[in-house]
Image (cartoon, helix red, strand yellow):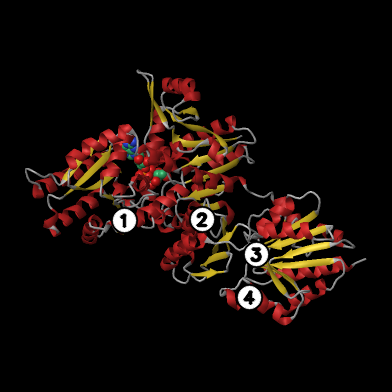
């Protein structure tokens, strides 16, 4: 198994030097990465992080192999003073506030930057010493923006990925940073850069363009990978005996009271004063709710030695006591406040017992607490998530009730709505969000990122495999051979059109196809995802005499017999109802999208919908369908602005396989050409056969199983011309 070196500021474990006891650190990054399993993701993970105590370093090195987090840990020693300047003066006083839009909190300083460079260099050196050629490096978060520079100076070929756990701010904010160029230039050296949200990626791109004077980041290295949680683990946690103990105790205190829960680290980004103001407004507006509701606010101590955080704590505590003083009574405390960490069992019990979770972050990279809350809800009595629209999780949790935490009055009204949200709706909404989280957990997050990091075609090979000079080296071979060809239609023989029904094939293409069709020794089939009626209109009505396959090969047309043959036995398509129900939910939310029923396949089209929003929902829909249909005889695929569910047998791969198998006259060479995900099935079948020489060609620059590329659809006619010449030359 390949090794992936994870690099983050802190290791996931701390050691109590006197007691020699190891504990797992809490926090967003640790929660996500703890859930990764080597088997699920396909890498041997080892973790590198900073330690400022030599004894602790020794202890971790000794204990590391069987550590609680199941990953080997490499502690990197940094002198305490240098660490202090790097962490407090630069990470926490400059980067953290600036990246969270808290400009008034930024304290620019030179010592911090100096230490930041020094620590980044130490970390990079440790990585270059440890890593072998085949290892990949995955750097986490804003603490190590410069590590890519220092690694690539020494080891330019090491694969380096970077994931940012906090927002990337608008270029208007970012460009204020004195060290902006060093940071951007370093990130641009990475082989993959990941963000939680599309808006962060867009901000990064525009910052590069503005700050580095028109430099364009390579699009293929930028990606959006919203982090997730170990959903299964949280689900199980809710059922553990230790959790039940807490549930029992709290239930007896809670009785009929409704709980609004808050779990936030002590930080100004979490918007705690805003949350308290909205709760106060709620209590003022709705006296009928008094004594029926409690805000249970847990604040996890953090950076308490920093004056700004101490001041924040005092402000929060003053607000809490003033609200309790103003509205409370001997038999009711409006806010239950805890300033402490809680165990994971207690956390799970609190999630389960609370009627509403409120997240009021002013800015938050993602916010895992909201995801954990969703997954911990029972299907019978689920709660509601009130979620700040400034948290990255807002794009993931599509059914959360969104709030603008700055709008105190409106948030107060939303709190009332959340408490009384009808049970039926809560059930549907939580179910849909849980399905999403079960289908996309922290291992999937890592897998997607690492797959993109690893999958980078070798540029040199790619060049000789593209049709840029109007030729492929193997085309010579076609002469005097029996050639069988499979041509996809949309995006291959004809350009993608925004209204699928209005597509017309160019006269030149038709002419070339006719000439190929009349050439001896060659045969082709146009194989499309379209239905029979459409292909009839395009080809049969004009009497072109082409062999056709509709609905991804579910139906085949022979010009000799003038008939369509159904290649898939007709059976009840039970899964269709289920799919249409889900598609409907997404169609409702996505203007311009529509559903097309093709018989053996159903397609959701979103070409005319708002681009970013629809792309995002499509990703969720895809995972939701995969989850829902895991046991159905169907295949879910994502094409160009479409999501399609088709009967397992309606598959271009099966069609190609069957065609070759049943042909009396076996071809010497097979060509397959297509532009989208469904064509990958043909490529995969052909490349798996050793008995026939085949050439698979992808139209477009996207990743593909095909070894050859035609970059643009408008080059396909030129390709057909070359094929025509090759098959007719003696
Ligand atoms: C950064 C970004 C992004 C907290 N208190 C306790 C406890 N926790 C666990 C929670 C959750 C995690 O810590 C907090 O995660 P968040 O995502 O809410 O926040 P940050 O620590 O600020 O993380 C953030 C994250 O990175 C990941 O990319 O989402 O936006 O700021 O998992 O459960 N766990 C236990 N007791 C506690 O008292 N057991």
Q: Is residue 450 visible?
A: yes
Residue occupying the point 64% across, 69% down: 490
Residue located beneath label 1 in the image: 426
Dot 4 or dot 2: first in sequence order is 2
Cα–Cα span, label 3 and label 4: 14 Å
**Cα distance between the residues tagged 4 and 1:** 42 Å
Q: Residue at x 48, y 35 (%)?
A: 118
Alpha-carbon span between mark 3 and mark 2: 48 Å
- Residue bearing mark 3: 554
What residue sits right under mark 2 in the picture?
208
Q: Is residue 73 left or right of residue 696?
A: left
Specify the label residue 534 is tagged with.
4
Q: Which is closer to the viewer, label 3 or label 2?
A: 3
**Vertical arrangement, residue 545 with respect to residue 644, above or below:** below
Decide which of tag 1 and tag 2 comes sooner along the chain. Answer: 2
* Discs 1/2, front: 1
Please state, as top left, top right, bottom left or bottom right, where the C terminus lies in the image. bottom right
Q: Is residue 466 visible?
A: no
Q: Is residue 391 left or right of residue 192?
A: left
Of callouts 4 and 1, the N-terminal one = 1
Please rate how many residues cluster around mark 4, counting C-alpha atoms within 10 Å: few if below 14, some from 14 to 19, many from 20.
some
Of badges 4 and 2, nearer the viewer stands 4
| Mark 1 and mark 2: Cα distance apart in space | 42 Å
Work out whether 75 lies above or below 399: above
Q: Is mark 3 within 8 Å of ligand 1?
A: no
Q: Secondary structure at mark 3?
A: loop
Q: Is residue 628 left or right of residue 511?
A: left
């Amino acid at each position: 198994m390949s090794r992936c070196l994870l690099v983050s500021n802190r290791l996931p474990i701390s050691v109590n030097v006197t007691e020699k006891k190891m504990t797992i650190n809490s926090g967003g990054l640790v929660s996500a990465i703890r859930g990764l399993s080597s088997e699920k993701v396909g890498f041997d993970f080892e973790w590198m992080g900073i330690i400022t105590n030599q004894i602790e370093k020794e202890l971790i090195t000794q204990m590391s192999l069987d550590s609680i987090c199941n990953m080997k840990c490499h502690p990197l020693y940094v002198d305490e003073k240098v660490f202090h300047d790097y962490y407090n003066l630069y990470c926490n006083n400059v980067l953290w506030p600036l990246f969270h839009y808290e400009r008034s909190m930024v304290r620019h300083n030179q010592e911090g930057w100096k230490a930041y460079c020094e620590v980044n260099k130490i970390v990079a050196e440790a990585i270059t010493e440890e890593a072998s050629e085949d290892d990949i490096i995955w750097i986490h978060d804003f603490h190590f923006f410069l590590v890519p520079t220092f690694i690539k100076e020494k080891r330019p070929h090491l694969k380096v990925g970077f994931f940012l756990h906090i927002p990337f701010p608008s270029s208007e904010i970012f460009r204020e940073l004195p060290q902006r160029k060093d940071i951007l230039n370093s990130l641009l050296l990475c082989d993959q850069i990941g963000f939680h949200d599309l808006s962060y990626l867009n901000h990064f791109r525009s910052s590069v363009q503005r700050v580095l004077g028109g430099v364009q980041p390579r699009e293929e290295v930028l990606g959006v990978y919203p982090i997730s949680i170990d959903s299964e683990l949280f689900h199980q946690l809710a059922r553990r005996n230790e959790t039940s103990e807490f549930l029992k105790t709290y239930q007896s205190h809670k009785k009929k009271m409704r709980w609004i829960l808050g779990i936030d680290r002590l930080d100004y980004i979490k918007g705690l004063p805003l949350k308290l103001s909205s709760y106060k407004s709620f209590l003022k507006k709705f006296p009928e709710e008094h004594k029926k509701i409690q805000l249970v606010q847990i604040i996890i101590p953090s950076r308490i030695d920093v004056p700004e955080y101490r001041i924040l704590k005092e402000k929060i505590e003053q607000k809490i006591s003033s609200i309790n003083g103003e509205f409370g009574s001997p038999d009711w405390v409006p806010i239950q406040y805890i300033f402490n960490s809680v165990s994971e069992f207690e956390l799970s019990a609190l999630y389960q017992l609370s009627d509403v979770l409120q997240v009021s972050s002013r800015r938050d990279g993602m916010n895992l607490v909201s995801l954990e809350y969703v997954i911990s809800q029972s299907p019978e009595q689920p709660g509601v998530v009130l979620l700040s629209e400034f948290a990255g999780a807002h794009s993931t949790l599509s059914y959360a009730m969104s709030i603008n935490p700055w709008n105190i009055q409106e948030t107060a009204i939303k709190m009332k709505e959340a408490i009384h949200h009808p049970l039926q709706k809560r059930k549907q909404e939580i179910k849909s969000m849980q399905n999403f989280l079960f289908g996309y957990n922290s291992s999937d997050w890592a897998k997607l990122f690492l797959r993109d990091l690893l999958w980078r075609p070798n540029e040199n090979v790619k060049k000789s495999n593209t049709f840029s000079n109007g030729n492929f080296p193997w085309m010579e071979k076609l002469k005097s051979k029996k050639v069988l060809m499979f041509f996809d239609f949309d995006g291959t023989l004809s350009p993608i059109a925004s209204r699928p029904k209005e597509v017309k094939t160019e006269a030149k293409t038709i002419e070339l196809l006719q000439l190929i069709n009349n050439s001896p020794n060659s045969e082709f089939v146009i194989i499309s995802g379209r239905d029979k009626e459409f292909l009839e209109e395009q080809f049969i009505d004009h009497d072109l005499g082409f062999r056709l396959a509709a609905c991804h090969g579910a139906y085949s047309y022979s010009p000799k017999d003038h008939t369509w043959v159904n290649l898939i036995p007709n059976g009840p398509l039970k899964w269709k109802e289920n799919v249409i129900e889900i598609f409907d939910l997404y169609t409702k939310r996505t203007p311009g999208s529509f559903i097309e029923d093709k018989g053996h396949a159903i397609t959701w089209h979103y070409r005319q919908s708002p681009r970013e929003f629809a792309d995002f929902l499509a990703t969720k829909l895809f995972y939701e369908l995969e989850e829902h249909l895991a046991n159905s005889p169907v295949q879910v695929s994502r094409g160009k602005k479409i999501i399609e569910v088709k009967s397992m047998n309606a598959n271009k791969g099966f069609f190609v396989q069957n065609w070759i198998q049943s042909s009396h006259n076996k071809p010497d060479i097979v060509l397959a050409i297509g532009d989208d995900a469904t064509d990958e099935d043909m490529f995969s079948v052909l490349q798996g056969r050793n008995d026939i020489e085949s050439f698979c060609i992808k139209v477009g620059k996207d990743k593909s199983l095909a070894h050859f590329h035609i970059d643009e659809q408008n080059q396909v006619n030129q390709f057909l011309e070359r094929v025509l010449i090759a098959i007719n030359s003696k």
